[in-house]
Image: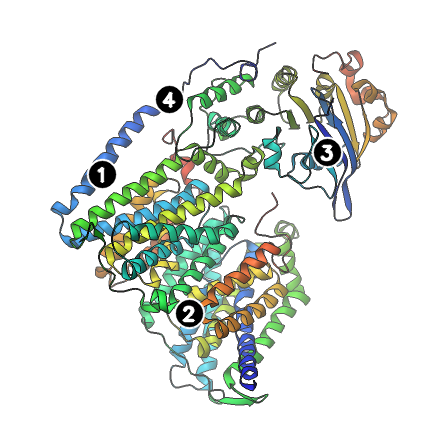
């Protein structure tokens, strides 16, 4: 009879799967470093308007990355994620107006309020699945937008919060577009790094398990609702940070920033990039912002129309649906 | 004291007006989802389309002819739009429900933006038809005549839809499709046809609701999303695919929403979400839901 | 000795149908206990009540003397109850190794870190488990690319990775080739006696070659609980199975020639 090494004795074999993963990881790191260098030096050779567009892309990309943690990694398609983005933006804006714009207060306020809003609403959403999750998150996003529109004394109502002071670092206000860009870049990288680390951690592996087959994960002893809830709150917090960065960049928040359209565009960015690929979500975000903000004026102000059409085309074009893409892509790149 | 009573009565009447309107809107959404598992996120955009048609025909110079013409055109446009949506989701039949929902989301964005291009950014109003544009006394209060008429028309429409779904052979087919699509398909009924028909009628109801609601809500960008959420809440609360659930859910939400707005204007949106959360915690399948539920028992 | 599993008066109804009606079941430590019965006898439902996938209407479930009736399937798994699922649906985007690592990391002493990636020790143990179930060298293959039999083997590896005290197997050999099936018997027979096994199986050859105790379920109730020989000899069991006239038709020639009790296993 064979001996059952895993059950009886300590395993002696060494891991054999590592060498195959080395090469792509090195290339990824190289590309990543190159992208960071380009992003960091961009304000030195770009016009202020182009720099601002790039900054907006970074803000939206971080937002999309936080959504991708839900959609692509955990399999929770949220249509209300803009609610937490907007909640973070309003919190950062309110704190800047009424308390202090000194770093890191607005940023922390944004992260805390984003996470808190997600914590208050997430306990009910994580109990549902698929289209029901979509419906509930949509309802929550819309509720938050209505709160922003009606809570005049805090949110400024339909006009939003205007005249938000520049973020200050050690008393110095960030007024130059280049400085704002660098400020946003630093926290984009931090947020991206956080989500990336979670996605490839043991916890992240469990999240992918939940995405693929939640009942089986429960049978393996994973409290899946708790995992989903924790992820929901984390994603809300990161979206809140992105919201705070939005305020630092445009110094204005309106109810539209947490509306249906913003949420739909973030979902579009995630889907364009291929759900589950954090890099892809950033590329998708870049496309969305370029079409909406940079090309929008030359399209007669109707970038939204183009994006809506892109949305329809992308849904048709996915070979195996929104859920199918990640299976095609993965060939050891995750490890 | 009497002022409080009057305010209460106005609120209750408003709740009924909105409730019946919501039922007309939500029943289409509920049946399409219950029968075909397609969550039509373009439903709100269809409502807004109807409302803008109302402004185009009626505008500031109301007449019965214009109003009825708007209703007729909206009905035809709704039928066509529903048929088109049904056709568009057909290639995604084999994919997940999520893909179909996302497709309708894309359509919703396109439709809403096209409406903005045609009708502009500003909120538009629709005047009530002549004879209904004033107020009348009822139970000791004065109340807008149009809203009262809306309650009447809404109640009749709701009754008709309810009877059709619950009492007729067509309705039996619809309910059977909700319960077991494959079974109905084996009986020799082409369920693509059923789907197209339900989609078309559901969309028709959405666009006519837009016209009917025009004198109350007007037409403005963003109304589509607001209305879609209300309809979704109704559908989730009532239970998917249930006509009775949609009716009860719509009336509850109509009352809760108006009462909330009257008493706690700042927190009205929270109250709506709270009602939704409460129902989902206590009865995840909705008040009248059967097989479907927010937590599938797999 | 405290039984590993004790069910008392377990009942579960679906509308008017009482799928499981007052089932008492006691599994001794180290047992290789088979649960058999005709289709619709309530085996699957009973299994779900034991694992906690489904909650019982009445009755109680004890795991090693502790009442777990109100606990979720997650908690029960953490307490040493681990299962394979009949319709093996695993993780479509993962490789076999990643799948087992998921289970291994959950039942390691260390926490599931939200920042660190898989530890080498986890990988090694996953590989060893894969080798044990006959999937050595197949760790890098995506689950959808595995054959049906291989997926069943992976299920077993997954269940073993949970460090079970009680291993619940729902038709582990269904759809397996004879070679795969005999390999499975060898694997199960070789499990250390600290792991108690309760399995549902239709293949009676497999049942009698492995089990040292058998419970026959019929119409939601326990028809008979006893040694394989007692079950083979029972008239009532024979009648329950489609009214088969002769015992040999039911239990086959293998069962007639060799007793089941001499198979090496705990007890």
The answer for which chain carries disc 1 is A
The answer for which chain carries disc 3 is C
Q: In the picture, which quadrant includes the C terminus of chain B? A: top right
Q: Which mark is residue C43?
A: 3
Residue in the image at 49% along x and 47% along y: B96
Whether the residues at callouts 3 and 4 have beta carbons within 8 Å, the answer is: no
In the displayed structure, C156 sits above or below B134; it is above
Q: Which residue is mark 2?
A: B49
Residue in the image at 53% along x and 59% along y: B196
Q: Which mark is residue A18?
A: 4
Report whether residue B198 is seen.
no
Q: Which one is in front in this view, the residue at disc 2 or the one at disc 3?
A: 3
Query: In 3D space, how far apart are the residues under numbered discs 4 and 2 (Cα atoms)?
Result: 57 Å
Q: Is residue B227 left or right of residue C241?
A: left
In the displayed structure, C44 sits above or below B194; it is above
Q: Residues within 10 Å of mark 1 (few under 14, many from 20)?
A: few
């Amino acid at each position: 009879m064979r001996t059952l090494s895993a059950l009886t004795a300590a395993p002696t074999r060494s891991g054999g799967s590592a060498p195959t993963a080395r090469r792509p990881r090195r290339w990824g790191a190289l590309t990543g470093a190159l992208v960071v260098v380009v992003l960091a030096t961009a304000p030195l050779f770009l016009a202020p308007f182009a720099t601002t567009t790039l900054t907006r892309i970074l803000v939206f990309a971080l937002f999309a990355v936080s959504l991708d943690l839900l959609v692509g990694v955990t399999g929770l398609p949220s249509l209300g994620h803009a609610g937490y983005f907007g909640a973070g933006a309003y919190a950062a804006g309110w704190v800047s107006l009424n308390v202090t714009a000194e770093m890191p207060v607005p940023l922390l306020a944004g992260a805390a309020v984003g996470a808190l809003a997600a914590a208050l609403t997430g306990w009910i959403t994580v109990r549902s699945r698929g289209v029901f999750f979509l419906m509930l998150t949509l309802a929550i996003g819309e509720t938050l937008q209505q709160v922003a529109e009606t809570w005049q004394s805090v949110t400024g109502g339909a006009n939003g919060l205007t005249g938000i002071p520049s973020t200050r670092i050690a008393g110095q206000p960030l007024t130059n577009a280049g400085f704002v860009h660098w400020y946003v870049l630093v926290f984009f990288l931090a947020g991206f790094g956080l989500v990336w680390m979670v996605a490839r951690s043991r916890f992240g592996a469990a999240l992918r398990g939940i995405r693929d087959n939640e009942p089986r994960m429960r049978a393996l002893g994973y409290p899946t609702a708790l995992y989903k809830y924790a992820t929901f709150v984390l994603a809300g917090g990161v979206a809140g940070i992105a919201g705070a960065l939005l305020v630092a960049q445009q110094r204005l928040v309106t109810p539209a920033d947490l509306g249906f359209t913003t949420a739909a565009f973030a979902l579009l960015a995630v889907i364009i990039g291929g759900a589950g690929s954090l890099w892809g979500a950033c590329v998708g975000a870049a496309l969305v912002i370029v079409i909406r903000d940079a090309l929008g004026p030359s399209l007669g102000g109707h970038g939204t129309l183009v994006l809506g059409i892109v949305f329809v085309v992308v849904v048709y074009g996915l070979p195996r649906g929104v859920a199918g893409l990640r299976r095609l892509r993965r060939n050891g790149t995750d490890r | 004291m009497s002022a409080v009573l009057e305010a209460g009565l106005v609120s209750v009447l408003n709740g009924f007006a909105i409730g019946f309107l919501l039922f007309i809107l939500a029943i289409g959404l509920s049946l399409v989802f219950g029968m075909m598992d397609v969550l039509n996120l373009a439903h709100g955009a269809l409502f807004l389309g109807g409302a803008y048609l109302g402004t185009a025909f009626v505008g500031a110079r109301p007449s019965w002819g214009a109003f009825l013409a708007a209703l007729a055109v909206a009905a035809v446009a709704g039928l066509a739009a529903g048929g088109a949506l049904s056709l568009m989701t057909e290639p995604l039949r084999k994919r997940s429900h999520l893909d179909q929902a996302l497709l309708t989301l894309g359509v919703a964005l396109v439709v809403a933006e096209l409406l903005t291009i045609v009708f502009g950014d500003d909120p538009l109003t629709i005047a009530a038809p002549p004879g209904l544009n004033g107020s009348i006394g009822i139970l000791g209060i004065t109340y807008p005549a149009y809203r009262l008429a809306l309650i009447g028309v809404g109640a009749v429409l709701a009754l008709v839809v309810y009877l059709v779904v619950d009492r007729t052979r067509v309705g039996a087919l619809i309910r059977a499709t909700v319960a077991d699509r494959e079974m109905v398909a084996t009986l020799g009924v082409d369920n693509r046809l059923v789907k197209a028909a339900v989609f078309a009628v559901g969309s028709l109801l959405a666009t006519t609701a837009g016209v009917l609601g025009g004198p109350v809500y007007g037409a403005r960008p963003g109304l589509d999303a607001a209305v879609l959420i209300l309809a979704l809440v109704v559908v989730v609360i009532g239970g998917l695919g249930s006509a009775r659930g949609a009716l009860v859910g719509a009336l509850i939400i109509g009352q809760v929403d108006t009462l909330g707005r009257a008493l706690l204007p700042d927190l009205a949106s929270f109250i709506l979400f709270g009602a939704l959360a409460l129902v989902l915690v206590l009865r995840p399948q909705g008040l009248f839901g059967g097989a479907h539920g927010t937590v599938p028992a797999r | 000795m405290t039984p590993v599993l004790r069910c008392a008066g377990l009942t579960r109804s679906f509308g008017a149908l009482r799928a499981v009606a007052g089932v008492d079941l006691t599994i001794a430590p180290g047992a290789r206990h088979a649960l058999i019965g005709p289709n619709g006898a309530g085996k699957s439902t009973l299994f779900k009540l034991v694992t906690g996938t489904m909650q019982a209407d009445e009755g109680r479930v004890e795991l090693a003397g502790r009442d777990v009736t109100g606990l979720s399937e997650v908690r029960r798994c953490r307490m040493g109850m681990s299962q394979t699922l009949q319709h093996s649906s695993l993780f479509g985007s993962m490789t076999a190794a990643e799948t087992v690592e998921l289970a291994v990391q959950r039942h390691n002493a260390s926490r599931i870190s939200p920042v660190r990636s898989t530890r080498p020790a986890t990988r090694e143990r996953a590989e060893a488990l894969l080798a044990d179930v006959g999937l050595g060298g197949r760790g890098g293959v995506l689950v959808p690319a595995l054959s049906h039999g291989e997926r069943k083997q992976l299920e077993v590896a997954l269940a073993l990775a949970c460090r079970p005290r009680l291993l619940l197997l729902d038709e582990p050999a269904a759809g397996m080739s004879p070679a795969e099936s005999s390999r499975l018997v060898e694997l199960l027979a070789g499990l250390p006696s600290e792991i108690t096994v309760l399995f549902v199986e239709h293949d009676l050859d497999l049942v009698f070659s492995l089990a040292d105790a058998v419970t026959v379920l019929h119409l939601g109730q326990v028809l008979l609980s006893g040694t394989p020989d007692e079950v083979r000899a029972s008239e009532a069991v024979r009648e329950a199975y489609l009214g088969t006239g002769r015992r040999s038709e039911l239990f086959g020639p293998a069962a007639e020639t060799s007793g089941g009790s001499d198979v090496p296993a705990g007890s």
